[in-house]
């Protein structure tokens, strides 16, 4: 069960990461769009699990590796944007959000 503070921090981190990816995705990934779908914050607000949806790419896992290799730079940019709102900038762990592909697969199976 998430506390109110965890929910507020996760919304803030999601919003700020979305802005960062909107501005920096061109230099990190080229012509690939990255959407931050879910952010889950640990109870101590020190860790964040960030779920990304990556389009249009043949191998999203490869694009996720590139994002993970730039985690330090992304966390630094996040720290610059939330420095007046958060005491601790959470450590970021990026994961691939496959809910859209899962929904597409279910839809395909139902149409059979």
Image (cartoon, grey):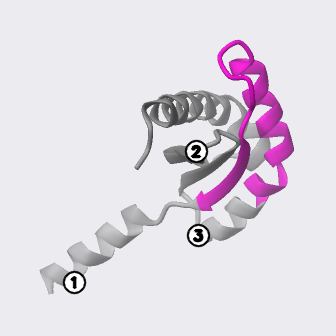
Magenta segment: 66-95
The residue sitting at 50% across, 60% down in the picture is 97
Secondary structure beneath dot 2 equals loop
Foreground of the two, 5 or 84 = 5
Q: Is residue 71 magenta?
A: yes
Give me the C-alpha separation between circle 3 and circle 1: 21 Å
Image spot of residue 61 (x, y percent): 65, 69
The residue sitting at 55% across, 54% down in the picture is 51
Badge 3: how crowded within 10 Å, few (<14), some, or many (20+)?
Answer: few
Does residue 36 lie above or below 110 as drawn?
A: above
Does residue 62 lie above or below 82 as drawn?
A: below
Pointer 1 residue: 109
Q: Is residue 11 left or right of residue 31?
A: left
Secondary structure beneath dot 1 equals helix
Quarter of the image with the C terminus is bottom left
Pointer 3 residue: 58
Q: Which numbered circle lies on residue 78?
A: none
Image spot of residue 29 (x, y percent): 73, 49
Give me the C-alpha separation between circle 2 and circle 3: 35 Å
Image spot of residue 11 (x, y percent): 49, 32
The residue sitting at 62% across, 34% down in the picture is 17
Secondary structure beneath dot 3 equals loop
Q: Is residue 37 left or right of residue 76?
A: left
Give me the C-alpha separation between circle 2 and circle 1: 38 Å
Earlier in the chain: of badge 2 and badge 3, it is 2
Pointer 2 residue: 43
Badge 1: how crowded within 10 Å, few (<14), some, or many (20+)?
Answer: few
């Amino acid at each position: 069960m998430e506390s109110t503070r965890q929910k507020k921090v996760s919304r803030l981190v999601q919003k700020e990461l979305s802005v960062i990816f909107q501005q920096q995705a061109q230099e990190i990934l080229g012509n690939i769009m990255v959407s931050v779908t879910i952010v889950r914050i640990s109870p101590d607000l020190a860790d964040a699990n960030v779920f990304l949806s990556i389009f249009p790419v043949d191998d999203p896992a490869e694009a996720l590796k590139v994002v993970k290799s730039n985690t330090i730079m992304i966390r630094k940019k996040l720290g610059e944007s939330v420095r007046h709102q958060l005491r601790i900038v959470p450590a970021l762990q990026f994961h691939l959000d496959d809910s859209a592909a899962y929904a597409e697969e279910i839809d395909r199976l139902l149409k059979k």
